[in-house]
Image: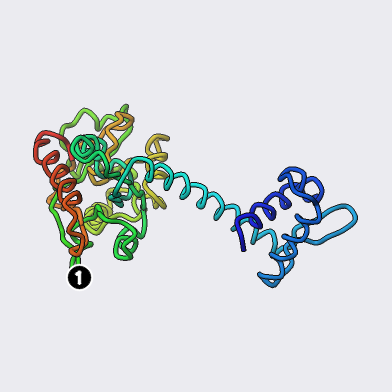
Amino acid sequence: MTTKQIDYCIELAHTLNFSRAADNLFVSQPTFSYQIRLLEEEIGFAIFERSGKGAALTPAGAQFVSFLAGMREDLKRAIEQGQNFSAKYQDNISISLMVRQAVCFLPEAIRLFSETNPDVQITPLFQYENGVESFLKNEADILFALKEQTRQIPGIAVHNLFESRIYLIADRNDPLTAKNLIQEADLYGRTLMVGGGSPPALKSVQHRLISSGKIQYFNSPDHDTTLTNVAAGRGICLAPGFLNDHSGQFAWIPFDCKESFSCVLCTHKADSRPSVTSFINILKQLYHDAVAFPL
């Protein structure tokens, strides 16, 4: 299968007309039709049904073209990134994190790093799920993780970054925003959003609150849905400080509990590049200096 055949297939799926698709791609119709037939012979099933009126996607063809379209976009982005990289950079360091705000000083770290390493690119990879698995497959050079996730994983180096406490997230007009520290009793009679892949420490606090019998709860599939429900006045939630985007949209108020999150950066022990060590040290220094920054 060639990229030309992929483009022909996608265009025909769009126009459902051999002549129009061939014209759009500036090739003759016999050449166009021949390439489509070669592709179908290679994959072993019909992508299109031919008729006097043109072409129609078969059920298998519709699924196949959907996959091809996604693959073509991925390939386009890969080529663009490769062009950018080859024009300016000699090396690349990728860092995997679930959301941008998880490492809130990442933009500043990239800026400082670029001052002394202008030929090394830093590439963020946002992977809300499966970040650890991706890192272990060497798809990322650095992984932001909770320390509990890194236990008994061989071949990695763990770098302590910061401790993150638990906060109550509420609408800015909520009466609870008048408090500087939220106690358990402050939540009695309220609806607490839970779920959405909460880490064990947070689940422990949620379970303790719900077990009191004085707090209602509502299951939410993910953090973004939870924030939408909070904004809609449907409830409140508890979350790690490292998810705070500091946009001011919501009130983040410290919650009084012993649980917290040890946030770390992981690297591969076999990766001895000085640039990786330098970037890790810059991030660690930024967090060390931000002693008054809410985390």
Indicate the quadrant where residue 100 lies.
Answer: top left
Name the spot of residue 282 as percent of width and height, x first: 15, 42
Name the spot of residue 35 as percent of width and height, x first: 72, 60
| Residue at 20% over, 68% down | 155
Which quarter of the image is occupied by the N terminus?
bottom right
Q: Crowding near pointer 1: few (<14 within 10 Å), some, many (20+)?
A: few
- In the image, 241: left or right of 171? left
Which quarter of the image is occupied by the C terminus?
top left
Give the residue type at disc 1: Pro
Q: Which residue is mark 1?
A: 154
State the SS at label 1: loop
Q: Is residue 29 above or below residue 180?
A: below
| Residue at 56% over, 52% down | 72
Name the spot of residue 14 as percent of width and height, x first: 72, 48
| Residue at 76% over, 61% down | 34
Q: Is residue 158 visible?
A: yes
Q: Residue 27 or 236: which is nearer the viewer? A: 27
Q: Is residue 192 visible?
A: no
